Amino acid sequence: MKIVIVGGTGTIGKAVAKELGQRHRIIVATSHGEHKVDMTSVQSIEKMYQSISDIDAIIITAGKISFKPLAVITPEDYQIGFDNKLMGQVNMVLIGQRYLKENGSFTLTSGRLSDDPVRSGSNGSVVNAAINSFVKAAAIELPKGMRINAVSPTIIEESKHHYEAFFRGFEPVPAARVALAYSKSVEGAQTGRVYPVG
Amino acid sequence: MKIVIVGGTGTIGKAVAKELGQRHRIIVATSHGEHKVDMTSVQSIEKMYQSISDIDAIIITAGKISFKPLAVITPEDYQIGFDNKLMGQVNMVLIGQRYLKENGSFTLTSGRLSDDPVRSGSNGSVVNAAINSFVKAAAIELPKGMRINAVSPTIIEESKHHYEAFFRGFEPVPAARVALAYSKSVEGAQTGRVYPVG
């Protein structure tokens, strides 16, 4: 298969590339480099799809959210998560449905905050739940046998030092374990599913 | 209690006003009339809170979403649901946390599309799931003993003729039954809960 990983240079993206790279051709798309994509721009997404032909699977492991206490978070802070992690991924699907090969698959990334909230995490909760629900809804409307799933990881062992103070008591998982869920989505046959990891 | 119902002239809002009006003082806020509020404007929400003192409970039964096939829905269509039903309700809480009385409550409205998708319903799925997750996240950060819950109704008996063609096989519930969930949220003591009805 020809698999595009958007955000393939991040902690999860690299582990997914390593897992799937053993059996498939991997193309890494990032905000800079050979295969460029800015997920907040529909023009940029359109251009990426036009420049890479015959894609079997799109995996997205990128997306920004706001992280602020409920007492001070603003509508503009919320919009950051909507424009980046949420609509960035949704637009990769809305546009991608016209470019992906028959029986191709989309695998999105959400996160456990959807059901397991922490202080300052409301934007993450909202965005992750929205992504999980989007894959359930999109799965019943995608054309040409296309499939869509989401991986919902908890905090990652390799990058936990950045934010573990906000996630006390959450058991970190190695990125290699999270990568297995992407393999299940891409190499399996399920659709409309959310795979929680950790 | 002094209870404000935003959208109190709609099918659900009227049933909620009837149920809770038996025991409490009800103020209905709409886009026109004595108590005005435009949920898409933070200035308008701020003004509403400044004009009504000592609110014990806010109930929101208003909010617009887009309803279009996945093949043609656009980022702008998605933004309609974000600006109206989602951020309209979120902003009523973000601003309201500074105005509500101690131990006051917020009750938001989502809908069963979050987990039970239909064709053309992806924006509704995403928005409703986001609202459900917001109440779980906000519940752990609200100040002064404030509570928050969401009611997630299926299609309503009294208004089903508008959209039943999109919801074949969904069992309609009378608005009076949905109203009971709002009573449970406002008059009970739970927080961070989603009450599915139907």
Image (cartoon, coloured by chain):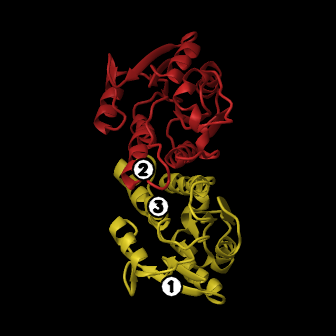
Chain colours: A red, B yellow
Where disc 3 sits, the SS reads helix
- Closest to the camera, between mark 3 and mark 2, is 3
Q: Which mark is residue B27?
A: 1
Mark 3 neighbour class, 10 Å CA radius: few under 14, some 14 to 19, many 20 or more: many
The residue wearing badge 2 is A78
In the rendered structure, the residue with mark 3 lies on which chain?
B
Residue A19 point in image, percent of width and height:
59, 15
Which chain's residue wears label 1?
Answer: B
**Residues tagged by mark 3 and mark 2 found on one chain of the structure:** no
Please give the label number shown on residue A180: none
Residue B66 visible, this angle:
no
Label 2: few (<14), some (14–19) or many (≥20) C-alpha neighbours in 10 Å: many
| Quadrant in the rendering for residue B82 | bottom left
What chain letter is assigned to the residue under label 2?
A: A
Amino acid carrying label 3: it is Leu
Helix, strand or loop at mark 2: helix
The answer to whether marks 3 and 1 mark residues whose Cβ atoms lie closer than 8 Å is no
Q: Is residue B15 above or below residue B122?
A: below
The residue to which callout 3 is attached is B94
Residue B137 in sight in this render: yes
- Confirm or deny contact between disc 3 and disc 2 (CB under 8 A): no
